[in-house]
Amino acid sequence: MTASDFRRMALSMPQATEGAHMDHPDFRVKGRIFATLFTRDDLTWGMVKLTLDQQRQFVDADPDIFQPVKGGWGRQGCTQVCLRAADKAAVRSAMLTAWLNTAPKSLVEERDSPTQKRKPTAPRKRAT
């Protein structure tokens, strides 16, 4: 997965916009960040904002793709995504989960109306 793929995926979420903070792109819904892109050690990474339980599920399902961000941000659910190892389906599930965590309740309810219903799928452990 590339940074462009991650960007397109983030911007495909309802009412998502791209902004920037701390010199890297971020993706917001109604002004609140749900994902970012950053570079570390010459690699581009994504980040999705999950709950701690969600973070545990994604990390347990695929530790090659998902890792808690180091430090306090990670202890709050911020989860880094190794784009080089990423599987688009797994990242799409994490991205949608992050968007659902961040979007206003009214927007989530609108999105989940019977004509637009699409729930995130729980991560599944990849066979090794």
Image: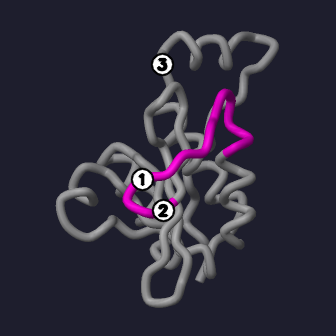
Which circle marks residue 24 in the picture? 2
Q: Give the Cα separation between the discs numbered 1 and 2.
A: 6 Å
Q: Which mark sits nearer the N-terminus, 2 or 3?
A: 2
Which circle marks residue 21 in the picture? 1
Q: Which residues are magenta?
A: 11-24
| Image quadrant assignment for residue 109 | top right
Secondary element under disc 3, as helix, strand or loop, is loop
| Image quadrant assignment for residue 32 | top left
How busy is the neighbourhood of tag 2: few (under 14 within 10 Å), some, or many (20 plus)? few
Residue 82: say if magenta: no
Give the camera-side residue of 112 and 15. 15
**Residue kind at label 3, given as amino acid type:** Pro
Q: Give the Cα separation between the discs numbered 2 and 3.
A: 24 Å
Tags 1 and 2 in contact by the CB under 8 Å rule? Answer: yes
Which circle marks residue 35 in the picture? none
Q: Give the Cα separation between the discs numbered 3 and 1.
A: 21 Å
Secondary element under disc 1, as helix, strand or loop, is strand
Q: Is residue 83 left or right of residue 113?
A: left
Residue 69 location (% of width, % of height): 32, 66
Q: Is residue 89 left or right of residue 20?
A: right
